[in-house]
Amino acid sequence: MKNMFAFTLAEVLIILGVIGVIAAITIPGLITNYKAIQLHSKFKKNYSLLGQTLKIAQEDGVVFEEFAYGSSDRYDQVNAFKKYLVGVVDCEISKNRNLKACLRITYGLSENFKDGYKTLSSNSPDLTNQGLFDDGQILLQDGTLVFFNADGQMLGLSVDINGVMSPPNRWGYDLFTFQIKNENLIPMGSNGSKYIDKDVYCSLDSESNFNGIACASMATDLDYFKWVVKALK
């Protein structure tokens, strides 16, 4: 009779243990990379979409000026943008303010999701009281939420790339800010933008209430998302 070969129970358990150790080492890294790739892809998509929308609007004669918007016409830039985007929802229209995917703000604080937006280092209880989210917002078809800011000093857009219902709702992780300057959409933190000091405005150690606003300039690189997802998991 031919000899029969088989693994003993002890050998099987050893093999399973080795597989488990390898899985424990590799799977967290794979998950981090997957999240980073997803976030990076959404960031690039929205940066491109909003930049193209700005250019098309300008070619039609729409003028976006940093100091052009006062209290009486604070939503003009929203109306100008949304007409060039397909299937968007204007969250400021009263009948849409109850949509869960829109951010409801009362007295500078968010109403419809816990704790509101946070800084990169999570030191702020609710970023919506910083005044950067109250000049209009539109909801894109894929759930992206775009906020407008026109405060007389800066004309900017803040973009929640995965929507308010998806955590962590943190500046520099899934919330990024751009500035419209010299007819261009530039990531905040880039040369010429209002907030450029990364040690203050894109750092895990900063206590600034605007910490995270300058991270958009770094988010064009996939390695940034790999870093931030790993650092904040």
Image (cartoon, rainbow, N blue to C red):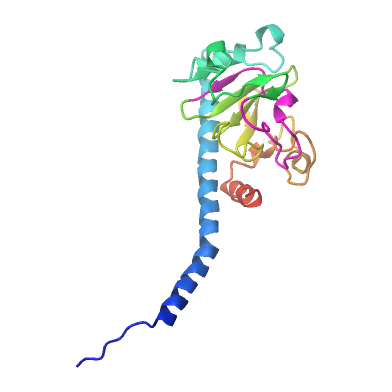
Q: Position of residue 162 (x, y in %)?
A: 54, 35
Span shown in magenta: 112-140
> Eyeballing the image, is 117 above or below 133?
below
Q: Position of residue 184 (x, y in %)?
A: 61, 25
> Eyeballing the image, is 41 above or below 56?
below
Frontmost residue, 168 versus 173: 168
Frontmost residue, 205 versus 91: 91
Q: Give the side of residue 167 with respect to residue 195, left or right.
A: left
Q: Can residue 30 be seen at all in this image of the molecule? A: yes
Does the segment drawn in magenta span residue 122?
yes
The quarter holding residue 181 reads top right
Residue sitting at 74 percent across and 16 percent down?
A: 152
Residue sitting farthest toward the left: 1
Q: Give the side of residue 223 with respect to residue 1, left or right.
A: right
On the rendered image, what quadrant is the N terminus found in? bottom left
The quarter holding residue 98 reads top right
The quarter holding residue 138 reads top right
Does the segment drawn in magenta span residue 150?
no
Residue sitting farthest toward the top: 72
Residue sitting farthest toward the right: 207
Q: Can residue 183 be seen at all in this image of the molecule? A: no
Dominant SS in magenta: loop
Residue sitting at 27 percent across and 87 percent down?
A: 4
Q: Position of residue 136 (x, y in %)?
A: 62, 17
